[in-house]
Image: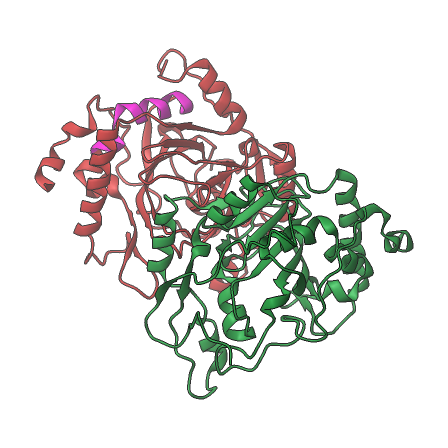
Chain colours: A green, B red
């Protein structure tokens, strides 16, 4: 039985708990890694790092074409890991792309990305969730404040804060098209959310929307501690964002004409594999939380452009 | 019968029409005004002007206190010009404050504001609508793209584009708490909205939501013409924004902890008074569109701080 360091959704009161885990899991012998001491300090302090030129313009072009290609391929795919807009046939997200697409499988092993994850997590890593997202302009919905870790812990059984999300943004992110917002430093606190799990499943769907939502007082405190700062991950297409599993983040709606798309990998430490959920809930499906055949990634030291699947798709 | 230069909501097709009216109504003899040639060029080009220091810090403090005072006074006022949040008792907007509050009446006549409106509109001016808004943090709703003039023309019978809105922002406007967004240059085009007025009033409320909403193609064209720009009216508390009645504007939701409040006056040219609506609709109520006892404003050349009502309210 793994200890529950971060209980949530068990009380009527919300509560802020100090983070129990390191932010950076130092393992200097195994992984020197590409991040500078300055990068590491910034990540430790803010809980995220934004790189504007990890990939070349040509790389980004290839990525965009591959995204279009995968979207096209899955147009008529009705499996549960392809998410469509309610009321229309349009594909919005495709999960498990590190398994279902050779190009994105290789990208998820790309040394540029993996070595950063390894350095932050101080161990070998694997992908616990992946997806590509496509959000059209004009009607992009807001995504309220949340810590991914809260859900991954309670619903998926992730024991510790030792995972990092990597988002490769394939469209220009402006202030006005709903960029990801992050509260710097919020990764150092765990907001235990209110909402007792109902005794039976009656009106479960109604209850569910209220589970895992941080309370306004805790959010205010986190923003106050950040000196009133709420950072936005804006930047040109191709920017790569690494952010801690527990950082409080959100995005506003997007009513601009500019659509948004990105590739999303969650790297988890091989020493932090999923156990039983820290709640009475059943584990969520494999496409949201990988449990099967977990192997540490062997990084591929190659250019994106050389990946063979691109040639096939042309 | 006044000619309808800007018909809308009469066809199934949306359409972009070139603006028929001047942006700046020059009347150099009567109103030299406080705006520089540079200011006027900027307003002509962008359709708005943002001033960050029209009022002093002390002025802003007084404004904030008066706003709080008026909100408090109207807590239990159930008249139709006090708008409450659905499902709660909280006051969100108070209309007609240039009539119902001595402080805001005097503010609406303040020479600093009125002389700018006169210079832009080339005539004497009056207030066609006023309000104060209070929007709490965390749950601020988005306001989709619209031209105020489209509504004022079709529903209120404003004949020409010869009105200017003045918004005095009483809270800091950040990129992340849903600032007003404006498409620069969009005031030079009129987007005639689709949506035929239904023959009978059946399901009127359902129809209504779709009336006066610009189509996505026109919005795309307007943003393209602006070189992809969407400007945001960010700035410290006390910033004053003047924007053309026909500029396309919107705001995203506000899920930050920071509330937003502002005072809003619409100055209309005395030569552009409301006639019958340019549609079959009945005129909207007086609190949304002033028609009664219209008199040109006589500007008051006084400091905000000296206004007597403040002394009373302390």
Q: Along the line of sight, which residue is nearer the eye, B110 or A25?
A: A25
A97, above or below B22, in the image: below
B42, above or below B64, in the image: above
Q: Position of residue A130 (x, y in %)?
A: 67, 62
For this orientation, the residue located farthest to the top is: B29
Question: Which secondary structure dominates the residues rendered in magenta?
Answer: helix
**Res. B8 in view:** no
Q: Where is residue A143 in the image (x, y as percent from the top left)?
A: 52, 58
Answer whether residue B86 is magenta in the image.
no
Q: Position of residue A210 (x, y in %)?
A: 43, 71
Q: Along the line of sight, which residue is nearer the eye, A121 or B272?
A: A121
For this orientation, the residue located farthest to the front is: A29
A96, above or below B265, in the image: below
Q: Along the line of sight, which residue is nearer the eye, B250 or B293?
A: B250
**Residue drawn at x 27%, y 28% as measured from the top left:** B297
Quadrant hosting residue B29: top left
Q: Along the line of sight, which residue is nearer the eye, B93 or A16?
A: A16
Answer whether residue B114 is magenta in the image.
yes
Q: Position of residue A114 (x, y in %)?
A: 69, 54
**Residue drawn at x 21%, y 30% as measured from the top left:** B58
**Residue drawn at x 13%, y 36% as measured from the top left:** B310
Question: Which span is picked out in magenta?
Answer: B106-121
Horizontal arrangement in the rendering, residue A190 relative to residue B193 (left or right): left
């Amino acid at each position: 039985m793994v200890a529950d360091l971060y209980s949530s959704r068990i009380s009527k009161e919300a509560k802020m708990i100090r983070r129990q885990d390191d932010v950076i899991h130092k393992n200097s012998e195994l992984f020197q890694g590409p991040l500078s001491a300055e990068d590491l300090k910034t990540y430790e302090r803010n809980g995220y790092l934004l790189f504007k030129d990890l990939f070349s313009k040509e790389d980004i072009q290839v990525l965009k074409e591959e995204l279009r290609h995968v979207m096209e391929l899955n147009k008529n795919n009705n499996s549960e890991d392809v998410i469509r807009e309610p009321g229309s046939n349009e594909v919005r997200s495709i999960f498990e792309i590190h398994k279902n697409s050779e190009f994105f499988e290789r990208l998820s092993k790309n040394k540029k990305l993996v070595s950063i994850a390894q350095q932050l997590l101080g161990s070998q890593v694997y992908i616990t969730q992946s997806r590509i997202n496509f959000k059209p302009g004009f009607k992009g919905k807001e995504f309220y404040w949340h810590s991914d870790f809260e859900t991954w812990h309670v619903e998926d059984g992730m024991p510790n804060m030792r995972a990092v999300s990597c988002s490769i943004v394939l469209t220009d992110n402006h202030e006005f098209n709903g960029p990801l917002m992050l509260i710097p430093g919020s990764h150092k606190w765990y907001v235990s959310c209110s909402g007792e799990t109902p005794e039976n499943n009656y009106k479960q769907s109604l209850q569910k929307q209220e589970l895992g939502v941080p309370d306004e007082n805790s959010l205010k405190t986190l923003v106050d501690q950040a000196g009133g700062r709420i950072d936005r991950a804006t930047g040109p297409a191709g920017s790569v964002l690494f952010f801690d599993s527990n950082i409080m983040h959100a995005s506003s709606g997007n009513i601009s004409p500019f659509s948004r798309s990105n590739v999303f990998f969650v790297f988890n430490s091989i020493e932090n594999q999923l156990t039983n959920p820290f709640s009475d809930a059943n584990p969520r499906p494999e496409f949201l939380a990988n449990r099967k055949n977990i192997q540490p990634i062997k990084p591929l030291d190659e250019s994106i452009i050389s990946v063979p699947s691109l040639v096939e798709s042309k």
